[in-house]
Amino acid sequence: MLIDFFYTLRSAKLPVSVKEYLTLLEALKAGVVGPNSGEVDPSGEGAYKIDDFYYLSRCVLVKDEKHYDKFDRAFAAYFKGVEMVADFTKDIPLEWLRKTLELELSAEDKAKIEKMGWDELMETLKKRFEEQKERHEGGSKWIGTGGT
């Protein structure tokens, strides 16, 4: 669990020891952060939050504040996009999307999307979003109102 995170920190030249890594895993197992931490979650989801894990891991793994910047860069590189994906998908009721798609998509388009699957669709949208440089309206390629 999280071994790649440990190696990412080591490759960023952070002096992280195996003992510290194991301490982090013990803290997670003990519920210091996450759904078993006893912290009241206003959303009611009871899930792990990336910010909580960030502060816990920085506290356990970084011995000297001069390494905070290295840690921040390594953490961001390893967990790139994690929060964005979670925030992107959790607040949109599926029914809103379904009704709009039923009105605008042909039977052929619907079949293509169903064949593609959720993960591939999200990956395609993520790539387009990264390529897109400005606001977009209409069309069938870019993300925006009336677009894909």
Image (tube, rainbow, N blue to C red):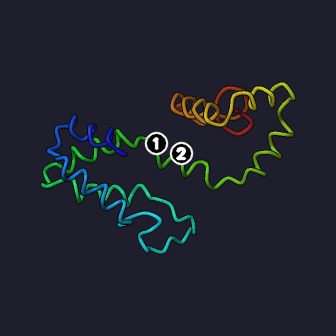
Tell me which residue sits at (44%, 58%) in the image: 49
- What is the quadrant of residue 93 in the picture? bottom right
Q: Are marks 2 and 1 in contact (CB under 8 Å)?
A: yes
Tell me which residue sits at (28%, 41%) in the image: 74
Task: Name the quarter where the C terminus is drawn.
Answer: top right
Question: In this rendering, would 122 be left or right of 72?
Answer: right
Q: Which mark is residue 94?
A: none
Which amino acid lies under the numbered mark 2 shown in the image of this protein? Val
Frontmost residue, 119 versus 30? 30
Reply above or below: 17 against 30: above
- What is the quadrant of residue 58 in the picture? bottom left
Q: Which mark is residue 81?
A: 1
Tell me which residue sits at (18%, 46%) in the image: 16
Question: In this rendering, would 80 be left or right of 84?
Answer: left
Mark 2, secondary structure of its residue: helix
User: At which x and y percent is residue 108?
Assistant: 84, 24
Mark 1, secondary structure of its residue: loop
Disc 2 residue crowd, few under 14, some 14–19, many 20+, Cα 10 Å: few
User: At which x and y percent is residue 9?
Assistant: 24, 41
The number of numbered discs placed on residues in the rendered structure image is 2
User: At which x and y percent is residue 116?
Assistant: 69, 28
Tell me which residue sits at (24%, 57%) in the image: 23
Q: Which mark is residue 85?
A: 2
Disc 1 residue crowd, few under 14, some 14–19, many 20+, Cα 10 Å: few
3D distance between C-alphas at marks 2 and 1: 6 Å
Which amino acid lies under the numbered mark 1 shown in the image of this protein? Gly
User: At which x and y percent is residue 133?
Assistant: 52, 31
